[in-house]
Amino acid sequence: MRSKKYEGYIYIAPWIAGFIIFTVAPLLFALYAGMTEWDTFNKPKFVGLHNYVQLFRDEDFLKALWVTVKFAAVSVPLGIAASVLIAVMLNSKLRGIYWFRTALYLPAVVSGVSIYLLWKWILDRDFGLINLLLGQIGLPKLGWLTEPSLVMPSYLMMSLWGAGGGMLTYLAGLQDIPGHLYEAAEIDGAGSFRKFWNITLPMLSPVIFYNLIMGIVGGMRKFGDAYIIGGAGNEGRFYMIYLYENAFKYFKMGYATAMAWILFLIIMVLTLLTFKSSSLWVYYESEVRSRKRK
Amino acid sequence: MKVSGLISHGLSRKQKRAARHALLYALLSIFSVSTVFPLLWMLSTSLKSGDIIFEIPPRLLPDGFHWENYARAVTEIDFLVLFRNSAFVAFLQLLSNVFVSAFVAYGFARFQFPGRNVWFLLVLSTIMLPGEVTMIPVFIGFSEIGWINSFKPLVIPGFFGGSPVFIFLLRQFFLSIPRELEESAIVDGAGSFRIFVRIYLPLSVPALMTIGILSFQGSWNDLLGPLIYLNDTDKFTLPLGLSMFNGVMKVEWGPLMAGSILALIPVLLVFLLAQKYFVAGFKLSGIKG
């Protein structure tokens, strides 16, 4: 019978092994590597906190950090607003709604390098689709990726295009809202806007909260599209791109590891702040009920 | 105020509803067109002849059907090799992500053992840990043992515990399976592994499908992993192979868009065949990063 007590360990053993090999050991090593100067060909040289000090004097680093934070700060709320709006529209019982729904989340089905290449081509200054359409209505061509001030708007446009995947979470959330809430509000004479503001939004807030965290983490880690598409004036050089360049182009492993730690810290702090703020704006029905009972 | 009140009262309920529907249709059409249009442009470019792609002003529609772009994509981008490599990596990652995660999740869901909660808390905390932090040390480790330029660094880690998010999701799913179902199996003398294979896995097919699709989509699109670990073009995966054609001086957009469309086909097929699970996957993953 004694062996039975530890039977569960047989099943979680692969995970424990992986945790030690691929998480604990690398983390400990990263702690050390971040404090070295190391090109992988020679032995690492211990430099203490020099990398971290150096990073905050590195203009390219600060630029990459700024570009990434700016992108996350605008794209995440924008994406949430767009997907909530579209989800509310898709939640109405219209004929053919299935086709609209499919069309709107198609961008989330197709993703990856194919789509990044497509966007690079769409944003092309001379032969791209967007300038073609602008030309049709008599507007001048714009250098979407060649004009530094337009690079960020281009990335925001792309992220908005892909917002359809999140929309489905909201749609599921909307379908869970009990109809009697709206009926009660209607009896009290509430209009559509008030119903949306006082019922729909609070009831969706847990979903918004979830997508907010996923969005912040995803935005800070942005890599693939920026690697393919780039952008003038380092405006498309996101944090992970600069980290990748340091590690695998310039072979500054210590420096890049320090960057990885800073990224981790930033993500942690943002996630914690979001969690802390959640008691102010996220509404959990079950919590309110249990509070009332007390 | 009064006038507008009169007008709105003047309209019957039916008319008001019709007006609202018309507005909804108009907005949804505009949004749908703007999501589908870029994809049609991709299709159009892939069918254009080389001369017409670089014509000013560009044309919306292709000059006939230049299927040779697809033939060129397959031969010049070495599409079949890239496809085979991508499929190989995606298949093994799927296998490990689904079955190893399920195996571990079963351990957490169905056994009481000392230290279980601590380990589970550690699983949860690794969900929040971005892979970027361990990326460089893991890369150095793999290069020390000479695994660079092979598929091993992409494939082997998954077999050590699968993925923490999937472990978490499957554990929740397994907890919802009533224990009574096991009892007759236990009476028949079945061991815990047999119960896992005969009872838990078959009952979890929907959850396993959803996770399988999420895993497949992730590995099929992964760029950073192959970019770091693979050096030889005959080992490249599709995303990496396609991205290499991006840097060249004059991009041949016709064949490149044709290749990009071919690369999307497996995901589209999975979507068409298992839409229900695909949609469930979206709901779990939220906004794509």
Image (cartoon, coloured by chain):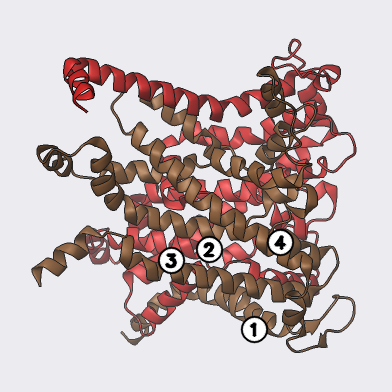
User: Residues at marks 4 and 3, common chain?
Assistant: yes
Give me the C-alpha separation between circle 1 and circle 3. Answer: 28 Å
Q: Colour of chain A?
A: brown
Question: Comparing marks 2 and 4, which lies closer to the viewer?
Answer: 4
Residue A274's disc number: 3
Q: Earlier in the sequence, mark 4 or mark 1?
A: 1
User: Residues at marks 2 and 4, common chain?
Assistant: no
Q: Earlier in the sequence, mark 4 or mark 3?
A: 4
Q: Amino acid at mark 3?
A: Thr
Q: Amino acid at mark 1?
A: Leu
Q: Which residue is mark 2?
A: B162
Q: Position of residue A246 (x, y in %)?
A: 80, 67
Choose between B280 and A163: the one closer to the eye: A163
Q: Position of residue A79 (x, y in %)?
A: 49, 46
Q: Which chain does red denote in the image?
A: B
Residue B114's disc number: none
Q: Amino acid at mark 4?
A: Ala
Quarter of the figure with the N terminus of chain B:
top left
Q: Amino acid at mark 2?
A: Gly
User: Residues at marks 4 and 1, common chain?
Assistant: yes
Residue A64's disc number: 4
Residue A28's disc number: 1
CB atoms at circles 2 and 4 under 8 Å apart? no
Give me the C-alpha separation between circle 2 and circle 3. Answer: 28 Å
Question: Comparing marks 4 and 1, which lies closer to the viewer?
Answer: 4
Helix, strand or loop status at disc 3: helix
Q: Position of residue A232 (x, y in %)?
A: 79, 47
Chain containing mark 2: B
Choose between B6 and A261: the one closer to the eye: B6
